């Protein structure tokens, strides 16, 4: 399913899930999740920014590593008006952690999304127990049955789901799985899985293959206010931005510029 990179990430994620299950049962984890403050609702407005906290990435290398004050970065995003904060929890290639998500989720007023290569419903419950209000599900690494199982678990936990697609075929599979569901966003990641390079032309090529009524999110390839305006003009309801914000000397100003440009383009 998909590239070697996604396959490797999915296999590593499954191994982490199995290890976690040996330490805590699903029933116990589910019970713990009920002690967590309820999930926060996601509001994109005319155009919303999902701003990402990550320490490194396979395509860009180290972005901040141990020097990153993840909470300060997240608060900067929240103060700038981000609709949601995406927090990487994948440890080996992205430098993420449970601790980052927990700390941010209990300290900011906007919803926080667990971004990882989730393959087991246990990990959805785990996200809720850590304080997440949303999870990312990658259609390419889940077969149809598993995608529905993950969506069902997310629904039961009261979580918003961002389903990520890489092409039109992924979108069609996702469309079938999310039909009739609430609290779902559908994203198009313009990254080429073979080269990990970005192809922003893909946003235009597949925009007509999104289902009506489901918020559309542009992922990857957004680095400026002009980029945000471009995808907003195509009809996208928001953008997920990580690397550009992590590398910016003034991430708050850049986040505000993206939000304002996107909303002006839609306005």
Image: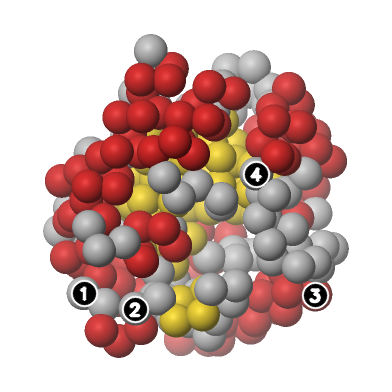
Q: Which residue is mark 4?
A: 200
Q: Label 4, label 2: how many angstroms apart (C-alpha)?
A: 25 Å
Q: Residue at x 80, y 54 (%)?
A: 143
Q: Position of residue 192 (x, y in %)?
A: 74, 58
- 132 above or below 173? below
Between tags 4 and 2, which lies in front? 4
Quarter of the figure that contains the N terminus: bottom right
CA neighbours of label 3 inside 10 A, class few (<14), some (14 to 19), many (20+)? few
Q: Position of residue 108 (x, y in %)?
A: 17, 53
Q: Earlier in the sequence, mark 2 or mark 3?
A: 3
Q: Which residue is mark 3?
A: 4
Near-viewer residue (208 or 256): 256
Q: Which residue is mark 2?
A: 64
Q: Label 2, label 3: how many angstroms apart (C-alpha)?
A: 26 Å
Q: How is the image coloured?
A: secondary structure
Between tags 2 and 3, which lies in front? 2
Q: Earlier in the sequence, mark 4 or mark 2?
A: 2
Q: Which residue is mark 1?
A: 69
């Amino acid at each position: 399913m998909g590239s070697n990179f996604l396959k490797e990430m999915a296999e590593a994620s499954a191994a982490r899930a199995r290890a976690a299950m040996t330490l805590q049962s699903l029933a116990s984890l589910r019970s713990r999740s009920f002690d967590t403050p309820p999930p926060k609702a996601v509001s994109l407005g005319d155009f919303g920014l999902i701003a990402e906290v990550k320490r490194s990435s396979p395509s860009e290398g180290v972005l901040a590593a141990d020097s990153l004050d993840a909470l300060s970065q997240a608060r900067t995003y929240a103060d700038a008006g981000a609709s949601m904060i995406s927090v990487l929890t994948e440890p080996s290639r992205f430098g993420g952690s449970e601790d980052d998500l927990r700390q941010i989720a209990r300290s900011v007023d906007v919803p926080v999304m667990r971004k990882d290569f989730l393959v087991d419903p246990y990990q959805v419950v785990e996200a809720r127990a850590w304080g997440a209000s949303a999870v990312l599900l990658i259609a390419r690494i889940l077969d149809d049955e598993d995608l529905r199982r993950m969506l069902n678990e997310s629904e039961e936990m009261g979580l918003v789901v961002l389903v990520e697609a890489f092409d039109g075929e992924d979108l069609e599979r996702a469309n079938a799985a999310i039909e009739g569901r609430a609290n779902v966003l559908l994203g198009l990641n313009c990254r080429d899985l073979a080269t990990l390079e970005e192809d922003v032309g893909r946003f235009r090529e597949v925009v007509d293959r999104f289902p009506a009524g489901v918020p559309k999110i542009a992922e990857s390839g957004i680095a400026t206010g002009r980029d945000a305006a471009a995808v907003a003009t195509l009809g996208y309801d928001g953008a997920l931005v990580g690397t550009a914000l992590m590398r910016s000397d003034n991430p708050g100003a850049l986040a505000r510029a993206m939000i304002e440009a996107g909303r002006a383009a839609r306005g």
